Amino acid sequence: MDIDWNAIQNMDMNQIGVGGPDVIYGYGTGINKETGQWNPPPGSGIGGSGDPVYNYDTDPETMRMREQQRNQDARDARDEKNRTDNAIAVIRGLATDYGLMSLYDKMVGFITDGYNGEAIMSLIRDTSEYKTRFPAMASLMGKGRAITENDYINYERNAAQLEQMYGLPKGMVLNNVTALLTNEVSGDELRDRVVLSSAASVSAPQQLKDSLRNFYGIDSGGLAGYFLDPAIATPILEKQFATAVIGSEALRQDVNLGLDIASNLQEMGVSQDQAREGFSNVKQSESLTRGRGDTVNNRELIKGTFGQEEDAQKVDRARQSRKGRFEAGGSFVTEQGGVTGVGSSTT
């Protein structure tokens, strides 16, 4: 093998590397000019001819680096185990809070398979167990109204508390959570519905229950459910309840009141106290609907008593007519000493 020694001496160190049998090894040393053989110098550790192979296993620097790597590997393993254990603890708490312990083993599998938190939640939400536990979620997401699982659970807890607070049968509100959430009944609106439901079905006087039945065909057994029905708008329920309250005061005074007049009084803003006083006056003035002279019918008497101008004028004329007849009757008694005039004042 011919070697150009001058070329070797002038080579750039960066041009020399380890390669096949035709590549020069170890620039500037270890090549026998006589034979062309490569013989690294003694102590180089390269293992050339006549030089013992260097034992890296006993090299202090190598041993130190290997020890550092083993320690780092141990720390990495501990850190990974801690992360996994923490993630499993979080998953267990989540499964407990969400009522999804049936998914616990599957959740742990997601962690050990290396899924991150976002991916795990996506996988959980795609399970049949999740869809059964949170049935309103799909509908809300479809409407762009998605809420968190914690919001869902808080809504359920609020429903249960309202049942207890207002004395409704257990489960009456809670069992309607899916429909209420699907119809986007807020927590505040739910409270309003429960208050109405309780007032109409639990503590209501019989006159109110009768009024609701007479006006809207709601029997006492279905009152609570009626006011919790999310298909009926809350403003409608509130109006019907207020109208029925007015009707109950009419029933209390044994005054015949139709739904149309009751609704009209409700739109006028007549309160329960005003209704009580007004129907008491109507009852006392029933004589204006009978007898001779100017009279009014029951409808006119009610509307006039509650201040509707045209009917109020009719009621006033009827009263004035009775007053005039009473005075005339009184004069007759004085002059004749009889009782005919007195009787005329009540006819």
Image (tube, grey):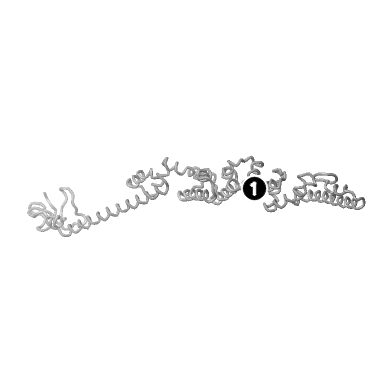
The amino acid marked with disc number 1 is: Lys
- Residue 301, given in percent of the width and then of the height, sits at 77, 47
- The residue that disc 1 covers is 239
Residue 187 visible in the current orientation: yes
Query: Quick check: 185 left or right of 321?
Result: left
Asked where in the image residue 10 lies, by quadrant, the reply is bottom left
* Whether residue 143 is visible: no
Question: Looking at the image, which is closer to me, 22 or 45?
Answer: 45
Seen from this angle, which residue lies furthest front?
337
Q: Decide if residue 34 is on the left or right side of residue 321.
A: left
Give the side of residue 64 with respect to residue 198, left or right: left
Q: Nearer the viewer, residue 137 or 296?
A: 296
Secondary structure at numbered mark 1? helix
Task: Pick the quarter of the image with the C terminus.
Answer: top right
Q: Residue at x 85, y 45 (%)?
A: 293
Residue 192, x across and y down, in percent: 58, 50
Question: What crowding class fits label 1: few (fewer than 14 Cα within 10 Å), some (14-19), or many (20 or more)?
Answer: some
Coordinates of residue 234 in the picture (x, y in percent): 60, 47
**Residue 265's x, y, as percent?**
70, 49
Q: Is residue 225 left or right of residue 90?
A: right
Residue furthest right as drawn: 335
Query: Which of these two is toward me, 122 or 253?
Result: 253
Q: Residue at x 40, y 48 (%)?
A: 96
